[in-house]
Every structure is written in structure tokens, then in C-alpha cells.
Image (cartoon, rainbow, N blue to C red):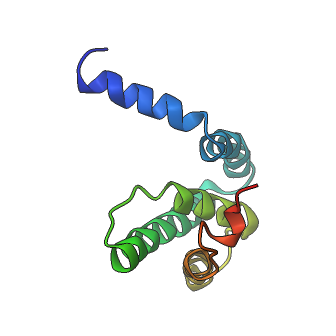
Amino acid sequence: MTGDGGSIFRSVRRFLRTPKGLLLVGFVPILALAIAQEDASATVPALLVVVITASLFDIAAFQLLYNKWIFPSGAILTGLILAIVLAPTEPAYAEIAGAVIAILSKHALRTRLSNIFNRPR
């Protein structure tokens, strides 16, 4: 690839080698199996609700707290984890509340360096 396309490809490859990227790669087959096993008309909307809610809330939190725009990779993983844990039959308000609580805790439960869920070794 040439130009900007090559740098995007390199950035994606670099991201997929990080812990977040590896988790994302690991979650894809789990979610694919869940969608295949359960009713896709229930699982896909539930998945989208938690991932989109977590992502939008994380973007807004970073903008309000740090005046910074981010790509919400951590929030996407949080949403995927919630989608795996919650039953697709849960009401939408429970999915939304779970996503909001998870992102709030990420920003509230912090040390000087990072949130307590991602502590450096």
C-alpha cells in the first residue's frame, strides 16, 4: 500500500499486537459462537447496545474530564465483555446501565498512573 492506507494498515497491525488487540481477536470467535447458538435477532442488538453505549460514554467522559478526543478501544472491549456476560434477553436499560457503570468506574477508580483494572506491573 502507498500513502495513508499503508500507515492505517500498520497502525491496525500494531494495535492487534497489544493486549487490547489480542483480547479483541479472542472475543470475536466467542461472540460468533454465541450469535450462532442463540437467536441473532436478540444477541446482535444487545451486543450493539452495550458496545455503542460504552463507547459513546467513554468518548464523552474523556472529552469532559481531559478535554481529549480518543478512539474508545477500551470501551469497545468493556462492551464486548458485558455482551458476553449479560443474557441477550436482559432489558435494554440493564445493558445501558451496565455499560455506564463500567465506564464510570474506569474513570472514578484510578491511581495516578491508570485505572485500577489496568494497573502496571
Q: Residue furthest left?
A: 3
Q: Residue furthest front?
A: 112
Q: Residue furthest top?
A: 1
Report the label total.
0
Where, quadrant-wise, is the C terminus in this rendering? bottom right
Front in this rendered view, residue 92 or 97: 97
Q: Is residue 66 left or right of residue 4?
A: right
Residue found at x 41% / y 55%: 71
The residue lying toward the viewer, choosing from 48 and 68, is 68
Is 62 on the left or on the right of 50, as rendered?
left
Q: Position of residue 100 (x, y in %)?
A: 54, 80
Q: Quadrant of residue 21?
A: top right
**Residue 54 shown left or right of residue 66 in the figure:** right
Residue 120 locus on image (x, y percent): 70, 57
Residue drawn at (46%, 33%), measured in percent from left and top?
Answer: 12
Q: Measured along the vertical axis of the image, is residue 99 above or below residue 48?
A: below
Q: Is residue 95 above or below residue 14?
A: below
Q: Quadrant of residue 65?
A: bottom left
Image x and y of residue 48, in percent: 51, 62
The residue closer to the viewer here, 49 or 80, is 80
Q: Residue at x 64, y 39 (%)?
A: 25
* Residue drawn at x 41%, y 69% as measured from the top left: 56
Is residue 5 depicted above or below 64 in this figure?
above
Query: Which quadrant, please, contains the N terminus?
Result: top left
Q: Give the image quarter of residue 6.
A: top left
